[in-house]
Image (cartoon, rainbow, N blue to C red):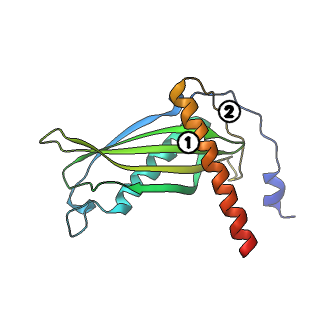
């Protein structure tokens, strides 16, 4: 056993539970020409980076420590985002496991000249809480109350089960 493996087996005290509102964020970014592809649409990678950043902030606020992206479960590009628009990302926790957290991010683009707001992207990301040594550590439990939080939690549980089934199938087929 390596020293790192021994270190990662250390116990961490459980933290108090938190609500999704305790760590939810709204992030805005005005897209500029350097964010665009030759067609004048914002690069999907720029949107992905903003989504990952927003989700990472939510995860770190929840655990009050380090957290890293484990997966992007789903990423939907519904409508293009154009140069000059204001992108608003709304991110919050849907589910917390032992060390992992699912964060949902909704992206909207606002045309600042007309005021039109469009839902452009949705994504679900899984983050893992880390201790100071880079080892997974327990995340505080998620306190679910209210119809919206309950619905999001139910949907996240279904996505988690589908992820687990897909991983098991991939491992079985090599």
Considering only vertical position in the picture, is 46 above or below 54? below
| Residue at mark 1 to residue at mark 2: CA–CA distance | 12 Å
Residue 168 drawn at (x, y percent): 73, 63
Q: Quadrant of residue 149?
A: top right
Pointer 1 residue: 59
Q: Nearer the viewer, mark 1 or mark 2?
A: 2
x and y percentages locating residue 40 in the rendered image: 20, 63
- Closer to us: 134 or 42: 42
The residue that disc 2 covers is 141
For label 1, the crowd category at 10 Å Cα-Cα, with few meaning under 14, some 14 to 19 and many 20 or more, is many
Q: What's the residue at 18%, 44% (across, down)?
A: 111
In the image, residue 140 sits, relative to residue 50, either above or below, namely above
Q: Quadrant of residue 117?
A: top left
Q: Which mark is residue 35?
A: none
Q: Is residue 64 above or below residue 17?
A: below
Residue that appears at 34% across and 54% down: 78
- Element type where label 2 sits in the image: loop
Where residue 106 sits in the image (x, y, percent)?
40, 43
State which quarter of the image contains the N terminus: bottom right
Determine if residue 64 is in view. Answer: no
Sooner in the amino-acid sequence: mark 1 or mark 2: 1
Residue 72 appears in the picture as rendered: yes
Identify which residue is drawn at 42% across, 55% down.
76
Indicate left or right for 18 with 79 as reference: right
- In-front residue for pair 7/43: 43
Residue drawn at x 81%, y 59% as measured from the top left? 5
Q: Position of residue 138 (x, y in %)?
A: 72, 41
Q: Nearer the viewer, residue 160 or 41?
A: 160
Local secondary structure at mark 1: helix
Q: Is residue 64 left or right of residue 79?
A: right
């Amino acid at each position: 056993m390596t020293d790192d493996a021994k270190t990662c087996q250390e116990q961490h005290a459980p933290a108090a539970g938190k609500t999704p509102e305790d760590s939810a964020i709204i992030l805005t970014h005005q897209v500029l020409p350097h964010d665009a592809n030759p067609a004048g649409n914002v690069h999907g990678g720029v949107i992905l980076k903003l989504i990952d950043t927003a989700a990472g902030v939510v995860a770190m606020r929840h655990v009050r420590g380090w957290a890293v992206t484990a997966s992007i479960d789903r990423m939907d590009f519904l409508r293009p985002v154009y140069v000059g628009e204001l992108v608003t990302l709304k991110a919050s926790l849907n589910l917390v496991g032992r060390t992992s957290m699912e964060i949902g991010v909704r992206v909207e683009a606002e045309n600042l000249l007309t005021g039109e707001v469009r839902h452009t992207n949705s994504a679900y990301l899984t983050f893992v809480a880390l201790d100071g040594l880079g080892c997974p550590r327990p995340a505080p439990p998620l306190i679910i109350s209210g119809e919206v939080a309950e619905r999001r939690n139910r949907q996240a549980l279904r996505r988690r089960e589908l992820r687990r089934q897909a991983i098991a199938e991939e491992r079985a087929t090599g």
